[in-house]
Image (tube, rainbow, N blue to C red):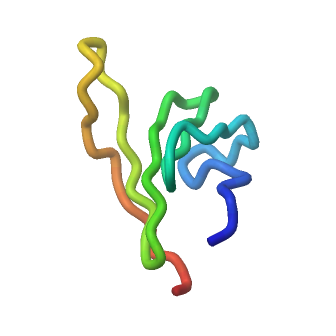
Amino acid sequence: MDPMTQCPRCQCRDVGRIGTHQYYCWSCCTEMVVTETEVRMFEVAEDGSLLEAGRVETAG
């Protein structure tokens, strides 16, 4: 699986790896979980919880 190089939400390249198949966009504060079939996006709430912000199907 290729590393995430661009945020699917804001198209920014300021994306870093935070775990296995997990990435974070510093521009729009979105956490992403990448699988073979989709990218799930989450907003980080003030209390640290994750709120689902959408998902994008990938070519698997």
Asked where in the image residue 57 lies, by quadrant, the reply is bottom left
Q: Residue 18: x and y, percent?
A: 54, 37
Q: Spot the residue most to the front.
A: 20
Q: Residue 43: x and y, percent?
A: 36, 34
Q: Is residue 60 left or right of residue 44?
A: right
Q: Nearer the viewer, residue 32 or 27?
A: 32
Looking at the rendered image, the quarter that the N terminus falls into is: bottom right
Above or below: residue 25 compared with residue 45: below
Q: What residue is shown at x 38% (from left), y 57% (from top)? A: 40
Q: Residue 31: x and y, percent?
A: 45, 39
Q: Is residue 28 left or right of residue 3?
A: left
Above or below: residue 6 compared with residue 57: above
Q: Is residue 26 left or right of residue 29?
A: right
Q: What residue is shown at x 62% (from left), y 48% (from top)? A: 7
Q: What residue is shown at x 72% (from left), y 35% (from top)? A: 14
Q: How many marks?
A: 0
Q: Spot the residue most to the bottom.
A: 60
